[in-house]
Image (tube, rainbow, N blue to C red):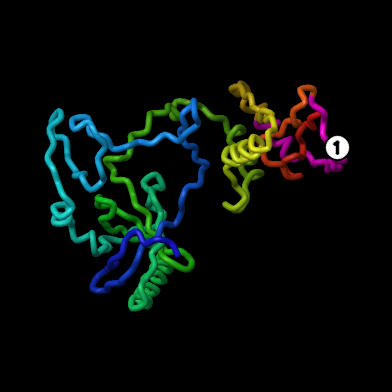
Amino acid sequence: MATTVWKGYLTFGLISIPMRLFAAARGERVSFNQLHNVCHSRLKMPLFCPVCNRNVERSEIVKGFEYDKDQYVLFNEEELDKIEPPSARVMEIIEFVKLEEIDPLYLDSSYYISPEDPGLKAYTLLMKAMQETGYGAIAKITMHQREHIVFIRPGSKNLTLHTMFYSSEIRAAEAVPTDKIEVKDQEKKLAGQLIESLATPFQPEKYRDEYSDNVRALIAAKLQGQEVAEAPKVHLAPVIDLMDALKKSLAEKHTPTVAIAPAKQAGPVAVSSGKKPPTRAVQPESATQKRGKKVAG
């Protein structure tokens, strides 16, 4: 079962729903440790006090805010607990807004809201009412030593909560002089056709982190004592003639693809150095990815 990151009540009007929050997603990546290049031992980061000239235990740590150079005001956990706002235990819905009004730029982390058994009916009522009206909810919640503004939206089977950046945290976009650029009607028409030719229903499961896959393949190859061939690089140049590029792009999309017969599997290639043959640090391509590509000899 997923770890609870917050437990309390979700309220709107006089209705309160006991609930828990669970992280809706987590990043996946290949992590490397820092090693000493002499003995390959893993390096540690001890908590070291330069004044006492010794390592310290975690039980000796207090929190401090630096209000001036090397001057701190100290706090303990009890003092910080005293100033927790009501949103530390109760997440009250402040207002409802139309779902399409929320700019995704403001969304940060995502969580699933799971009701406790006594609040299941009220939870279901709120979710269905939001589904039918097309509204999302704005609320406040305190967790991880910070009060967050959050956006709650209805899914098909549950409510999802997204912490949001405050407006003061959103950086102003750099001015791009798009209003000074003239775009021809024919260019817009061809660009629209190209977009339509690439349009498809969103299927998140078909996307992968190719770099992490390549790193894992590299690790496997090195464990087997194999050399690793460099992954192909893409070299691009700025487009000079937009119309020509759009027409060629559409022509490539409409050109019927020819199925390539699978090549017979060859035996291992001898390497003059006596080492095992190189292994590419990339995942095998599917037949769809191979279509239209130049076959490497």
Query: Residue 275, percent across and down?
Result: 74, 28
Q: How busy is the neighbourhood of tag 1: few (under 14 within 10 Å), some, or many (20 plus)?
A: few
Q: Quadrant of residue 276?
A: top right
Q: Is residue 261 left or right of residue 273?
A: right
Query: Residue 15, percent across and down?
Result: 27, 74
Q: Is residue 275 visible?
A: yes
Circle 1 sits in a helix, a strand or a loop, which is it?
loop
Q: Main secondary structure of the magenta part?
A: loop
- Quarter of the picture containing the N terminus is bottom left
* Residue at (32, 37) in percent of width and height: 46
Query: Residue 150, percent across and down?
Result: 32, 55
* Residue at (48, 66) in percent of width and height: 156
Q: Is residue 136 visible?
A: no
Query: Residue 6, percent across and down?
Result: 32, 61
Q: Quadrant of residue 115?
A: bottom left
* Residue at (16, 49) in percent of width and height: 76
Q: Is residue 220 left or right of residue 111?
A: right
Residue bearing the label numbered 1? 266
Q: Amino acid at mark 1?
A: Ala
**Extent of the magenta region:** 246-271
251 magenta-colored: yes
Residue 280 to residue 38: above or below:
below
- Quarter of the picture containing the C terminus is top right
Q: How many marks?
A: 1
Q: Is residue 278 left or right of residue 223?
A: right
216 magenta-colored: no
Q: Quadrant of residue 96?
A: bottom left
